[in-house]
Image (spheres, helix red, strand yellow):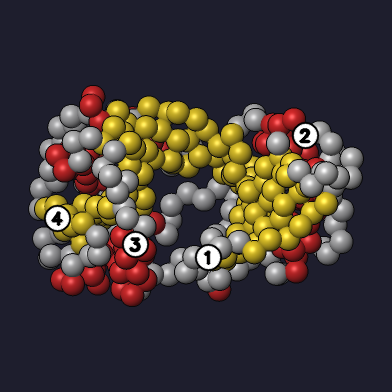
Amino acid sequence: MSITLTPLTDPDFRPFSRRIAWLAADGDGNPVGSAFLRLNSRSSHEHLAELELTVHPAERRRGIGSQLLAAVVAAARGHEVRTVLADARVGSAGDLFLEHHGFTVGLTLIYARLELALADPVVEGSPGYRLVSWTGVVPHEWAQSFTAARAGMDDAPTGDIAYGEDAWDVERTRYAARVIEERGEHLTTVAAVDPAGTIVGFTELVVPGDGKGDAQHYGTAVVPAHRGHGLSLWMKAEQIRRARARFPDLEGLLTDTVSTNTPMRRINDHLGYRPTHTDNRRTLALHEPGQPVEDQ
């Protein structure tokens, strides 16, 4: 089969990343597949790029995916990427394709969903701490300690993937919240405050603009020195309560957790989250230029 690959300009430009893309077409000009490579612009993450590759089911096993992947790998090397990341459902055709082409499992993500209509968690507070909450951009009085509390995610399990330092400052914290607002979604945050009046933990939830369907959990973290007090469970339970009260038409909450993050998986299980599927996040290390991609 004669396949033509056309590089595309992708309008999905984000503050800290951009995508390059390819469209695969057959001899008659019919689209049969596509590939996207997201490049990171932050210096600490420039070594990583994220791949999305799709081939029409009727056109698979004709080498189209391999041709697209070869173009992606060449472009990744040209942008000095050292590791390409790709997510695929465990055991799926995509997962097997990536394995065939040398991608190894960097980590495994367990996705879970909470049915809000069935959720009514009762969790006791942690003595000496209190909870605060806000919607959208963090209030001025909490901005500095909330940003500092993001360091609680620095030791989160990342499997065999070296993500690099993910530094936050107040400007980035506020900007990230504004981006979500500009998309028309609602960012709600619940945070734990210690006796000294400092935020030492938080959990974030992004709700669709119409308040319907499913909301997506973003970060949840507790500063290491304040772990062991049940703060994550308390914060997430409060987030559930607030979501139900403010968004009565919301149906569920979605989360994903690295399989080796046993403490967070226990919390989610306790709160009633139920697994929906499992993905492998696979990695391809780009060592030497000119490394061939086997056809399929």
Quadrant in the rendering for residue 164: bottom right
Asked whether the beta carbons under mark 2 and mark 3 sit within 8 Å of each other, the answer is no
Quadrant in the rendering for residue 289: bottom right
Q: Which mark is residue 182?
A: 3
The local secondary structure at tag 2 comes to helix
Can residue 49 be seen in this snapshot? Answer: no
Quadrant in the rendering for residue 39: bottom right
The local secondary structure at tag 4 comes to strand
* Nearest the eye: 28 or 289: 28
Say which amino acid is labelled 4: Val
User: Residue 187's x, y, as percent?
Assistant: 28, 54
Marks 1 and 4, the one that precedes in the sequence:
1
C-alpha distance separating marks 2 and 1: 29 Å
The residue located at (32%, 55%) in the rendering is 184
Q: Which residue is mark 1?
A: 13
C-alpha distance separating marks 4 and 3: 24 Å
Say which amino acid is labelled 1: Phe
User: Residue 36's x, y, as percent?
Assistant: 65, 54
C-alpha distance separating marks 2 and 4: 53 Å
* Nearest the eye: 181 or 230: 181
Please state, as top left, top right, bottom left or bottom right, where the N terminus lies in the image. Answer: top right
Marks 4 and 3, the one that precedes in the sequence:
4
Is label 1 or label 4 in front? 1
C-alpha distance separating marks 1 and 3: 14 Å
Q: Which mark is residue 59?
A: 2
Q: Which mark is residue 132?
A: 4
The residue located at (74%, 37%) in the rendering is 97
Marks 1 and 3, the one that precedes in the sequence:
1
Asked whether the beta carbons under mark 1 and mark 3 sit within 8 Å of each other, the answer is no
